[in-house]
Amino acid sequence: MTKTEDSSDEGKRLLSPPETSADGSTEHSIDVEAEATPPDTAADAGAASAAPEEPLLLRPEARATSENTNADTTNKPSTAGESTPGRKPGRSLKNGSKANSERARPWEGLFEAVLKTADVGPPLIEFKDLREGVRKWVHAAIAEAYRHHFYGHVEAETTKYLVMILADPSRFLCYTREHCGRIMSRLAWDQRQQGVKNGCSAETTLHWGSVSGPITNTMTTLWHLPWALNPWKRFEVAHAAEQRAWWLDNYDISKRRFLAGDLPKDTWAYRYMEQVRAGGNETLLQERDEEMFASCMIGFINLIGVVTISGPLKFFLMAMALHPEWQRKAQAEIDQVCGDDMPTLANFADLPTVRAILKETVRWRSGVPLGVPHQAEKDDVYRGVPIKKGTINIADDEMFVFGAAVLWGFDMSQKIDQRTGKPVPIDTQATNSHVVLEPDPYEMSFRARSEARAAQIVRNYEQVRPTLKVVD
C-alpha cells in the first residue's frame, strides 16, 4: 500500500516562482525534479429547541447502579471454576459451548473491549483495554487486501470517477470524497452505494474529534454541564447511536449474505465471518455485543480509509491546477507508456514522473502533519521499483491510480473569472483544522484532453459498470 519517498530535501529545485497565498504569505512551489528519475535510481451542531431527556445510562444514579452490577458480575467465579479468556467470568455463552464460543471469536484471548451502550467516547468503541488483538486483525485484513492490490476495485472506481468529472466537473471535491468512500465501503461490506454517506460520516466524526470541533474539545469542563444545557453531549450521543446502528445494519446484511453464500470473499466482513465459522460456529450465532464490536471494528477501518486518502487527492488536484508545466510532463510520460489505455497499477514502475508528483504533493501538503511516517525496515522491491532501507513510505495504490488516470483523462487549470478574465486564486494554505487535513473548498477547471479521450472515458466506464452494482 506504500510507495517510496526519499526523506532528504537536498538537491531539490523549485518548479516555478514562489506562490503567494490569500493572506499574503509566501509559499514555495512544489518540487518534483529530483524525484522524477528512472526506477533503477529512484529511491457545531446547534442545541435542539427542546432538550431531549438524558439517556438513562448517562444519569449518575444509573451509572452507579451499572458499575456496582458490573463489579458484582466481574467478581463472580465461572461455573467451570476458571475464567474464560477475553470474556467476563460468569457470563453465559449463547452457543451453549464454551470451547466453540472461544474459537468463534477471532480475537479471543487477546483483548477485552468495553462497548459503551449509551455514553460517548472515541467513535463507538471505548479503547480502555484494547490490546494487540484488534490491531493485529486490522493490520492483517488491510495487508491481505493490499497484497491483492485491492482486488481491482481502485481501478474500477477510478473509471467511474472520471466519467463523473466528465459529466459535472464543478462537483470534483464532493466526487473525490465519494470516490474514497465507495472504495472503502466495497472493501468493508460490498456496499459501494454508501460512498457519499461514508464520506459524510467520516467528516463529521473528524470534526467532532478535532480542535476545530465543538468547544468541549478545548474547554473540557463544559462537557460536564447538565444534559438539558449540553448540546455537545446530546449531539455526540445521537451521532454515536446513528453510527452504531448503521454499522450494525451493515453487519446484519453481510451476515445474511454470508450464510446465503452471496457475500464476496474479498470483503473484510467475509474475512471476519469466515474466521468465526472456522472456529466451529457454523451459524454465526453470537452475543449481540460481540456483533456490535465486530461491526464497529470493520466500520472504523472503513471510515479511516476515507479521510486519510481524500485530503491528499484534493491537494494533488490543486497542485496540478497551479503547475501546468508538470502536468504536461506527466501527461507526456503517460501518453508514451499507456497510449489510449487508462493507467493502472501495472504501469507503476514505468511512470516515475507521476510517482514523483504524487510524493511531492504529500510532502508539500501533508494530510497528517502530526503523524509519523512509515519507514522501510529493509531493502525491498515494489512493482519493479527498488526500495532502500530507511526510505519513507507515503503514497499508496489508490493515489497512484487516481493521479495517473486523472492526468490521462483531463487537462486541469485554475478557474477563470468570467467578469475579470483572470484566474480565480487558490489559497494553498487554507485547510480545515482536523486531525487529518483537507483543503478548504476551492475552484478549478477540468477539460477532457480530446473528444477521443472523452469517448474512451465513457467506453471504459461502460465496460466496468456491471461490476459496480450496488446491494440494497
Image (cartoon, rainbow, N blue to C red):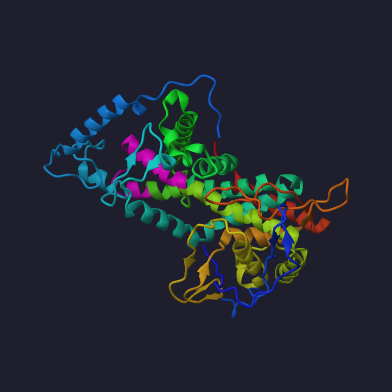
Residue lying at 67% horizontally and 69% vertically, measured from the top left: 31
Q: Is residue 466 left or right of residue 288?
A: right
Residue drawn at x 46%, y 21% as measured from the top left:
52
Residue at 16% x, 38% y is: 75
User: Does residue 435 sit above or below 57 in this rendering?
Assistant: below
Q: Is residue 6 left or right of residue 108?
A: right
Closer to the camera, 108 or 465?
A: 108
Residue 131: where, in percent of width, then height?
32, 52
Left or right of residue 235: residue 74:
left
Name of the residue lying farthest toward the bottom: 41
Q: Decide if residue 283 is in sight here.
A: no
- Give the image location of residue 390, x and y in percent: 47, 74
Where does the magenta region start and end? 274-300
Residue 152 point in image, percent of width and height: 57, 57
The picture quadrant where one finds residue 295 is top left
Q: In this view, does 410 lie above or below 254?
A: below
- The answer to if 299 sits in the magenta stretch is yes
Image-based side of 26 in relation to 146, left or right: right
- The rendered magenta stretch, by its main secondary structure, is classed as helix
Which quarter of the rendering shows the C terminus? top right
- Whole-percent x, y for residue 17 in the image: 76, 67
Asked whether the viewer can see residue 239, the reply is yes
In the rendered view, would you say 46 is above or below 17? Answer: above
104 magenta-colored: no
Q: Residue at x 21, y 42 (%)?
A: 98
Disc count in the image? 0
Residue lying furthest left: 81
Closer to the camera, 324 or 64?
64
